[in-house]
Image (tube, grey):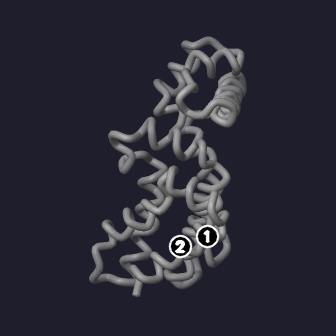
Amino acid sequence: MAVERADAARNRHAILRAAEELLAQHGPERVSLDAVAARAGVGKGTVFRRFGNRTGLFQELLAERAARLGEAIDSGPPPLGPGAAPTERILSFLDELADLAAKNITLIAAHEQACAADKHQDPTYRRWHDHVVGLIKQIRPEADAEFLGHLMLGSFDGELVRRITGQGGVGRLKAGVRSLATAALS
């Protein structure tokens, strides 16, 4: 993997922060690559070359937010990381994902809009799905793990997360997802 030049890293960081700020202030509908470039203090071409389009920009922003979670499931301490029973790991992962979704609801919704045509192929979603499917296969080898993985991750639909956390906080979201997962894994 090539090392990113310092100026490219600065631009990348400025662009992602600008996108994040615009999402928070105006919602996804008003986040254009022109507005992001202007806020970041870079040329529009820099944004296009780096991210391609809004979908690429939102995918990268979500991937950045999900990186810590990815590291934790790969090599962190149990129960999220290796070493715990599969059921503990999946419940811990879903709890962490609930926290991530609740803290980044505007980004999740923007990402879903931008990736609507092919959201199940998004790299971050694929990583989460592969992780959940692997654990489900350990717990219930006879089950349709792929379907159950999509079912569990579907609990983090942006509008659903907004509604549930708005009427009970992240605790309600975690409890509901845990209940679903526990029933599916029984």
Please rate how many residues cluster around mark 2, counting C-alpha atoms within 10 Å: few if below 14, some from 14 to 19, many from 20: some
Q: Distance between the residues labelled 2 and 1?
A: 6 Å
In which quadrant of the rendered image does the N terminus lie? top right
Residue at disc 1, secondary structure: helix
Residue 55 at x, y percent in the picture: 46, 33
Image label count: 2
Is 75 positioned to the left or the right of 181 in the image?
right
Residue type highlighted by circle 1: Arg
Relative to 36, is 182 above or below? below
Report which residue position mark 2 lands on. Answer: 176
Report which residue position mark 1 lands on. Answer: 172
Please rate how many residues cluster around mark 1, counting C-alpha atoms within 10 Å: few if below 14, some from 14 to 19, many from 20: some
In which quadrant of the rendered image does the C terminus lie? bottom left
User: What residue sits 61% from the left and 70% below the top?
Assistant: 172
Residue at disc 2, secondary structure: helix
Residue 147 at x, y percent in the picture: 31, 67
Residue 10 at x, y percent in the picture: 72, 26
Q: Which label is found at residue 106?
A: none
User: What residue sits 28% from the left and 73% below the top?
Assistant: 144
Pointer 2 with pointer 1, Cβ within 8 A: yes
Q: Can residue 12 be seen in this view?
A: no
User: What residue sits 59% from the left and 55% below the top?
Assistant: 101
